[in-house]
Image (spheres, helix red, strand yellow):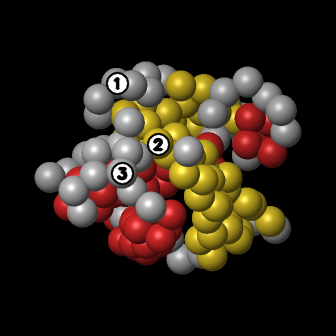
Amino acid sequence: MKRYAKAVWQGTGKEGKGHLSTQSTVLDKTQYSFSSRFEDGIGTNPEELVAAAHAGCFTMKLTFILNAAGFTPDNIETRCDITLIDGTITESHLNVKATVPGINEEQFAAAVADAKENCLISKLYNTNITHEAVLG
């Protein structure tokens, strides 16, 4: 399987503008710029997309791990915060809240740790990955 996304940029790094499109067209000429990346401008940015990719991948991996252990979650919600300092992504922090009938805290913590280490996006990153998990 291969997937693709395209970026187009026009102008200088600071005053220019660009857009992103994905194969699925979920992003279709979605605006990004210096101000959407480093200030509060309108549009997306690479770090936001990285956060979405990590949250989505982790949540799906956690679901598969829970299913393999005999549990079906009612709900899993994951927020991913990407920290960018001096041009380097220094951390990806996963904050997960889940409702999983029949599971205990120890089983849930083990599943979360496994998903954090083994989702494909975690394996791709070369940064510190941290997490918090709340079972509700």
Residue 130: x, y in percent? 63, 69
Amino acid type, mark 2: Thr
- The residue to which callout 3 is attached is 102
Query: What is the secondary structure assignment of the residue under circle 1?
Result: loop
Numbered tag placed on residue 25 in the rendering: 1
Q: Residues within 10 Å of mark 2 (few under 14, many from 20)?
A: some
Crowd class of label 3 (few under 14; some 14 to 19; many from 20; radius 10 Å)? few
Q: Quick one: 49 or 12, which is closer to the camera?
A: 49
In the image, 26: left or right of 12? left
Element class at badge 2 = strand
Residue found 83% across the figure and 32% down from its top: 40
Mark 3 vs mark 1, foreground winner is 3
- Residue at the disc numbered 2: 99
Mark 3 or mark 1, which has the lower sequence index? 1
Q: Nearer the viewer, residue 6 or 54?
A: 54
Q: From the viewer's perspective, is residue 3 above or below residue 64?
A: above
Residue name at image x 67 percent, y 52 percent: 81
State if disc 1 and disc 2 touch (CB < 8 Å): no
Name the residue type under label 3: Gly
Seen in the picture, residue 41 relative to 98 is either above or below; the reply is above
- Percent across and percent down for residue 46 are 59, 47
Residue 125 locus on image (x, y percent): 50, 70
Residue 57 visible in image: no
- Is 14 on the left or on the right of 1, as rendered? right
- Quadrant of image for the C terminus: top right
Rendered image quadrant of residue 85 = bottom right
**Camera-nearest label, 2 or 1:** 2
Residue farthest along the right direction in this orientation: 39
